[in-house]
Amino acid sequence: MQNSEKSDTSLSGELKTGERVHMIGDCQRIGTVKYVGAVEGLSGLWVGVDWDNGNAKHDGSLNGIRYFQATSPKSASFVRPRNLSHGISVLDALKLRYCNHSSTKQEEDEMYVFSASSKRVSVQLVGKEKIEDKLSRFEELTTASLSYLGVNSAGCSSEISAIVSNLKVLDLTGNLLSEWKDVGAICEQLPALHTLNLTNNRMAHEVEGLPLLENIRVLVLNDIGVDWLQVEMLKQWMPTIEELYLIGNNIRAIMPTSSAFVEGFNCLRLLNLEDNSLDQWDEILKLSQLRSLEQLYLTENNLKQIFYPDNQKLQEVFNGYKSLESSHKPFHNLHCLLLGGNNIEDPASVDSLNLFPSLVDIRLTENPIADPGKGGIPRYSIIARLAKVKILNGSEVSPQERKDSEIRYVHSILSKFYDSPEEVKRLHPRFGELKSLHGIEDERPSIGATGPQKMASGLVSITLKCVGASIGEKPPVTKKLPATTTVGKLKMLCESFFKLKPMKLKLFLQEGGSPLPTLLDDEMTSLMDIGIGQDSTFLIDDES
């Protein structure tokens, strides 16, 4: 017992407030030292730790005495110094990971960056046999995954370049790094390094001690608590970044330091701001002058509206903005914009995407506007509204799907009554263009002596498929029906077509490219109202 207390006394002198530590035996149990000293009612020395995952006992106070303030009510605990590690050098981590013949499959496959859908994508798969083959040839190692090994510094940095001089990709996810100077010391000794992953390290707010790192092309800063001011500081030390990942940092605002717009980042092609707290499109406009930006990921934010800024709008949003004629056209090279999981609900936001000069890949899933069940618009309508889109919600838009969607969209508009052509143009900017393109005759409601009436619209060919378990297996049926046929009438016809006993049926419209069929629950809606095209497919289920 006395030896343990002596050990704690010795180790406590090595621990400092603000230092990053992990539990001995659990490198993923990481926290920040907030207190070192005595605790009333307990013998010996203790370390107060605020744990990253928040799974602890209190908020830094014990028995009515406050020792420190934790980030949440249950994120802190007191730990004996002997149970904590303040980490190892990157060189020691390399030896630990790659000189250990019992490396696991997880360790071998851990190096990744985040894809558009926030999934791990392997950068280089280093198999166990390859690892063991290179144990005596460290200089051949080009990719290293040192995640959750307790790395806290470069150590003897000159040895790094001598041992792993060809390292190109370095994953330091979930370590104990907190000072940018330590990151700089590591990178400076790796002249071939082009990809650096610092996910889940808690970095200092002040960006100090970094050397010029002109070779870094991919920088992953997910879940490190960074804000845009730190990003602005980093760009002067890493001027050639092509891909920047900032997922999960609770970023609320884009804060340029030298003008109304973000400048620099001349090589930046991909910017990932998924899972942050951006709720104003005006903030996103500050990125509009990034000349090389091709892909912008904004999934899982709180955006409610999108618009493409003309010169007047930019002047309104940013006082003193110089004329567009002498500046870069906003988002000129942007071809991929991911907006899933936001709160966009107005069709005008969808229509505005047409104005982006190069935009062809768009994701709108998990927004009210893309959910017909919540009053949104279906896939075919989005395709028709967006003239240039080639990939929608991760699914390719084929030429045939585009043609069918545009024709169906025009018919759906023709089936409704509007007060004036101006109203149609305001609500459906592409209607006139598409009507002319596909040579569709005017079938809009006309006003006669008996009020609004719909003109005859001919027959449409549809395919009916039974999917209900109680209905049983039946071959699909293709029929030509009047476009004025209502959903209620179609249900009755299905009983006849498939010789079904009377039952409550549900109809779904199956659309190409949509992951789920659309429920048709308004029995008074006609096929014309739905806007279906030729050869549409309906699924028939029972309500049981």
Image: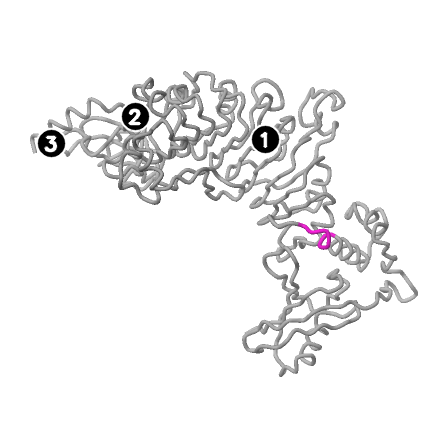
The CA span between labels 1 and 2 is 33 Å
Rendered view: 358 above or below 156: below
Residue type indicated by callout 3: Ser
Indicate which disc, 2 or 3, sits on the residue closer to the N terminus: 3
Q: Secondary structure at mark 1?
A: loop
| Quadrant of residue 490 within the rendered picture | bottom right
Q: Residue 227: give x, y in percent of width and height.
A: 48, 28
**Disc 3 residue crowd, few under 14, some 14–19, many 20+, Cα 10 Å:** few
Asked whether 154 or 345 is in front, the reply is: 154
Magenta-drawn stretch, dominant element (helix, strand or loop): helix
Mark 2 vs mark 3: in front = 2
Mark 3 vs mark 1: in front = 1
Kindly check if marks 2 and 3 are in contact, taking CB atoms under 8 A apart as contact: no
Residue occupied by mark 1: 269
Residue occupied by mark 2: 89
Q: Secondary structure at mark 2?
A: strand
In the picture provided, is 10 more to the left or to the right than 71?
A: left
The CA span between labels 3 and 1 is 55 Å
Rendered view: 399 above or below 125: below
Where, quadrant-wise, is the N terminus in this rendering? top left
In the picture provided, is 38 more to the left or to the right than 135?
A: left
Asked whether 280 or 311 is in front, the reply is: 311
Q: Residue 448: give x, y in percent of width and height.
A: 91, 63
The CA span between labels 2 and 3 is 26 Å
Q: Residue 309: give x, y in percent of width and height.
A: 71, 32
Indicate which disc, 3 or 1, sits on the residue closer to the N terminus: 3
Residue type indicated by callout 2: Ser
Q: Residue at x 43, y 17 (%)?
A: 210
Asked whether 149 or 69 is in front, the reply is: 149
Which disc number belongs to residue 4?
A: 3
